[in-house]
Image (cartoon, coloured by chain):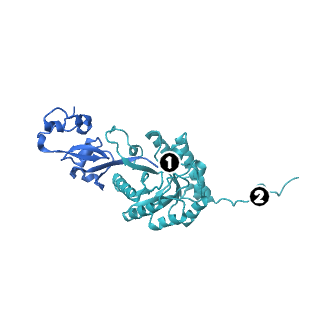
Amino acid sequence: MAPCLAAAIAGSGPHLYCQARAIVYDRRPVPARPDAFLIMQIKVNGQPYEAEDSLTAAALVERLGYAGRRLALEINREIVPRSRWSQTPLQADDEVELVHAIGGG
Amino acid sequence: MSASTDQTASTPAPLVIAGREYRSRLLVGTGKYRDLDENRRATEASGAEIVTVAIRRTNIGQTPGEPNLLDVLPPDRYTILPNTAGCFDADSAVRTCRLARELLDGHDLVKLEVLGDQKTLFPDIVETLKAAEILIRDGFKVMVYTNDDPLIAKRLETMGCVAVMPLAAPIGSGLGVRNPYNILTIVENAQVPVLVDAGVGTASDAAIAMELGCDGVLMNTAIAGARNPVLMASAMKKAVEAGREAWLAGRIPKKRFASASSPLDGLFF
């Protein structure tokens, strides 16, 4: 079971919501200090997404399994160049768009 | 190099778009294929050097390892032409182009299409003009999808579009060149490449567009939707080349009555 932040903070078993969205927490290390950050809500490609408030754009892309893929990223309709992803922290209510090239005419 | 003494046939003039030369005058889309492998094989058979792609959201949570379009059609081999298909207003078209430029490391050649209506997919010219102006100011090289109106085609050229691409018929309709006289007028007036984009159904349609003097043809459905897309891609390649050569060669005028091909002199009866 992927570590569940909500559970870590609340001191219970994995939160149901986190179980349902386990993919969000894949590869996330168990925090040494569970109170070191808070969980925030953002949107990724129109879908609600939970993340700790220290998450960077680069970490989000990696967590989604897209590291090394050719993508473009917008936060709140502003393009963030790939070179700046690692210095770009996400904030609560951010709307992230991740796009790629697909077949089209 | 061909043994032919005809320089026109052996060293055909390249298609020049935004200062870059292309040998192929057939541009192809990458939509509607069964899978990436068929897409790749058809694109190779077409001989196309410019391929259009769409820009869409990634599917969050879906198998991250799955192959990517640009893995099979790599940007170092093909000129990737991102389109704004699916945009029904200038804002979303501009936004799409900016994302595409970021995606392709600053590559600024785009196909602008702003659609006005789901049923016909005819271009919304008011929004197209608006988007073209913003994009050109922003440094994009804009190849623009438009209707077959010679006045609008000229306007788009004057604004600074690097190629004007009137439709032959509605996107995906396969109806062929519906208004050859307008296409001819657009070609005659143009100082930038004119490419027929959309509406081609089969090889003869592509040849007709090229015989009218178009600089190229862009198509997707006619190839991807054929029973054998790879074979149709090959047919389209030949049709575009044949149409181009026929235009360069200069066709005979149409006459109402016959003109014998064998001489009448020397008849022995």
Image quadrant assignment for residue B256 = bottom right
**x, y percent for residue A66:** 30, 43
Q: Which chain is blue?
A: A
Looking at the image, the residue that sits furthest to the bottom is: B158
Measure the alpha-carbon separation of dots 1 and 2. 39 Å
Helix, strand or loop status at disc 1: loop
Q: Residue at x 16, y 45 (%)?
A: A38
| Amino acid carrying mark 2 in the image | Phe
Residue at which label 2 appears? B257
Q: Quadrant of residue B114?
A: bottom left
The label number, if any, that marks residue A6 in the structure image: none
Could you classify mark 1 by the number of other residues whose Cα lies within 10 Å: few (under 14), some (14-19), or many (20 or more)?
many
Whichever of callouts 1 and 2 sits on the residue coming sooner in the sequence is 1
Q: Nearer the viewer, residue B187 or B4?
A: B187
- Say which residue label 1 marks: B220
In the rendered structure, the answer to whether residue A65 lies left or right of residue B210 reads left
Question: Chain B, which colour?
Answer: cyan
Which residue is at a point 59% across and 48% down the rendered structure image?
B203
